Image (cartoon, helix red, strand yellow):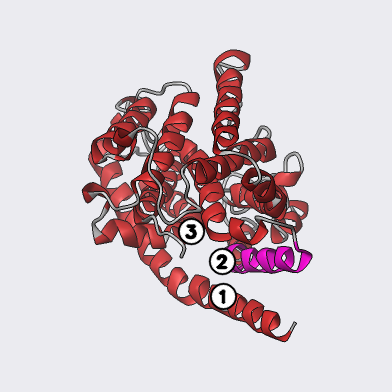
Amino acid sequence: MKLRFDDLTSLRGVAALSVAAMHLWLDLNNQALIAADSVFNTGTQFIAKSYLFVDFFFVLSGFVLFISYAGEFSTRINLRDWKTFLVRRIGRLFPLHLFMLALFLPYELSRIYLSTGSSAFAPPNTVENFVLSIFLMQAWVPHGFGWNSPAWSISAEWFVNIFFPVLAFIVLRQSRAFSAAAAVILLAGIGVWCLFIAPDVQLWNNSNYPLLRCAMEFTIGLCIGRLSGADLVRATPAIPVIGSQLFIAAILAAAILAMHLGLNDTYPVVAFSLLIYAIAVRRKDTAFLSPRPLRLLGEWSYSIYLVHRLICVVTSFVVSRLMHGRMLTDLEAAAMFVAVLAVVIGVSSLTYRWIEVPARRAVYGMTIRNARTA
């Protein structure tokens, strides 16, 4: 029996929407639509720091794949099972990605006829990067980011997914104490990098060592799965208070506060890891993460993550032309945030229903049929 952690689904939706808000904020600044002294630039660092939710996704991905698939590689690594796993991951990651990548082509071609501030197929939206993006390999090479830029993290995750059976096999053959030590060492490594090696620059972002970033945090997620006993139906935390609603709320608040204050990247990443572990050992939903709208956001999170970039880019460009050089007031900017994010949610609900779910079911059904005839 596989466990469900619906609180993590809710958090996934909030995280995806926060990343969308960050990219819209960047676009509004790039188009000079909001002033430097706008409340969106001076009131909080939360939006600017929302790129750290990608780190949440990496840790969460390791945890979710552990509870979903690790059991298949607990005693040995069977090549047929490895192939089945990869085919299912292709069915999960690629269909919507390819759909959105195709939609970026008309936008890029429009630069030939419209004054967008850059020429068509200029870096980073080169033909070479488009080809790399088709195969989700853009994060595997330097300067490969472009087109639907958030997909760089999907590319990094796809790379790590290829080696998941080996990682899961290793983690499952070690004790929970080993997993705890490994998670602490990996988090300490992130801390050393962010606090001491490069404390004044954002080296822990998408342009520097994306595969290392993903691999470290994905492995932390695997260790959390093992440490929390998520491969078991029943497990009790070593410290009972860790699974309490109060502890979960406190860790979530600490992560939000660290981002609001613009603290070093280390602190939110550690908080996210603790948050996932606390929810894992709790084994039941919390009251404040249970509302159905949050659950739906979580279900649509992958669509939100891949759909939002094109909507943000096009909207900010159109609004900048309509404003004729005038900047948005804080109230107008707030209204634009609400409207654009509402459109992103609406479109994502459709892509989830008509692209994600049918593709996933088709690929999963194919692997089931192949297993029966093997």
- CB under 8 Å between discs 1 and 2: yes
Residue at the spot of label 3: 302
- CB under 8 Å between discs 2 and 3: yes
Residue at the spot of label 1: 359
Viewer-proximal residue, 26 or 367? 367
Q: Where does the image place residue 71, in percent across and percent down from the top left?
A: 60, 58
- Does the rendering let one see residue 329? no
Q: Where does the image place residue 369, in percent across and percent down from the top left?
A: 65, 84
Q: Is residue 316 above or below residue 246?
A: below
Please rate how many residues cluster around mark 1, counting C-alpha atoms within 10 Å: few if below 14, some from 14 to 19, many from 20: many
Q: Is residue 265 left or right of residue 82?
A: left
Q: Quadrant of the C terminus?
A: bottom right
Q: Where does the image place residue 28, in percent across and percent down from the top left?
A: 42, 41
The prevailing secondary structure element of the residues shown in magenta is: helix
Q: Residue at x 29, y 32 (%)?
A: 253
Q: Residue at x 61, y 69 (%)?
A: 91
Check disc 2 and report its element: helix, strand or loop. Answer: helix
- Does the rendering let one see residue 282? yes
- Residue span colored magenta: 78-100
Residue at the spot of label 2: 96
Mark 1 to mark 2: distance in Å? Answer: 9 Å
Say if the magenta span includes residue 79. yes
Q: Residue at x 73, y 66 (%)?
A: 83
